[in-house]
Amino acid sequence: MTKNPERHKKDPHYRQAKHKGYRARSAFKLLDIQKRFNIFKRAYYILDIGSTPGSWLQVAYKFAEENLVKYKDSNYHRDHFKIMGVDVKKVSPLEGIYTVKMDITNPEFQKELDDFFIGKKLDLILSDLSINKTGNKFVDQLRQINLCFKVLNIVKLYLKYRGVLVLKLFQGQDFEKFFKAMKNEFFKTLSYKPKASRKQSNEIYLIGLRKNN
Ligand SMILES: C[S@@+](CC[C@H](N)C(=O)[O-])C[C@H]1O[C@@H](n2cnc3c(N)ncnc32)[C@H](O)[C@@H]1O
């Protein structure tokens, strides 16, 4: 978790995350998104992009494990799950989760995906990526959007037909351009600001429901 003891003392999500054993308060953003959109329904093959310190991976594991029992029926189900986390920073090990320390723009990353998922398409892709900010709002926004377009390329190649994407973006320059590009890929695309998202932050989550090809 980030180091700002004074702010944390007053932050209920931070305290709750500590209490529940989550590595970051962002876990509650994903839990809120799940509650609203049921993104983990029948999700077994999951990729989490920008994973460090790992709270979204913890949440993904919980739901993927539950799915093994919950959806054991004649509809789409699997008897196992696979979760991969990727980040430029190391993720401390989490049982049952494979993590890769790599920049997603590195062409080698696709090989990692192919090797781990063995050519199988994914049910759910999560991206909570945030660039290291330079302080120049214009430049930062451009870099963040460019990175999100890289994620969209991964989504085009690896997410299954009717799969789901959750992606963090910042409102500002080219937001609409990205939103439009994402809308092209899904039957339904929505934007959502989770309750745990700080009010002063301009972050917003885009939810792509049911990939259309
Ligand atoms: C807000 S944090 C993610 C928090 C995480 N969802 C959690 O709940 O623990 C954003 C992460 O994106 C990672 N990141 C930024 N650019 C990246 C890139 N090009 N490739 C991989 N990871 C990147 C950062 O290192 C950072 O750890």
Image (cartoon, rainbow, N blue to C red):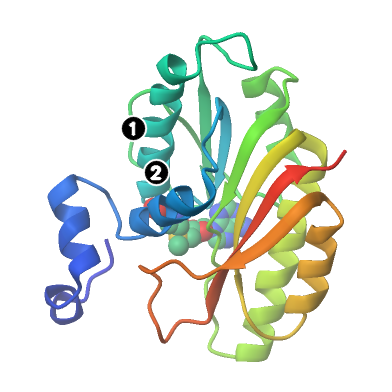
Q: Nearer the viewer, residue 90 or 166?
A: 166
Q: Position of residue 55 (x, y in %)?
A: 35, 48
User: In the picture shown, does residue 95 fall above or below 108?
Assistant: above
User: In the picture shown, does residue 44 fall above or below 130?
Assistant: above
Q: Is residue 23 left or right of residue 205?
A: left
Q: Which residue is mark 2?
A: 91
Answer with the quarter of the image where residue 1 lies.
bottom left
Q: Is residue 182 left or right of residue 169?
A: right
Q: Which mark is residue 94?
A: 1
Q: Nearer the viewer, mark 1 or mark 2?
A: 1
**Helix, strand or loop for disc 1:** loop
Answer with the quarter of the image where residue 109 lies.
top right
Q: Is residue 143 left or right of residue 128?
A: right
- In contact (CB < 8 Å): disc 1 and disc 2: yes
Queried on whether the Cβ of the residue with tag 2 lies below 8 angstroms from ligand 1, the answer reads no
User: In the picture shown, does residue 130 fall above or below 96?
Assistant: below
Q: Position of residue 141 (x, y in %)?
A: 66, 80
Q: Position of residue 138 (x, y in %)?
A: 68, 89
Q: Nearer the viewer, residue 115 or 201?
A: 201
Which amino acid, by three-letter code, is at mark 1? Leu
Which residue is rendered at x = 71% and y = 53% of the image? 151
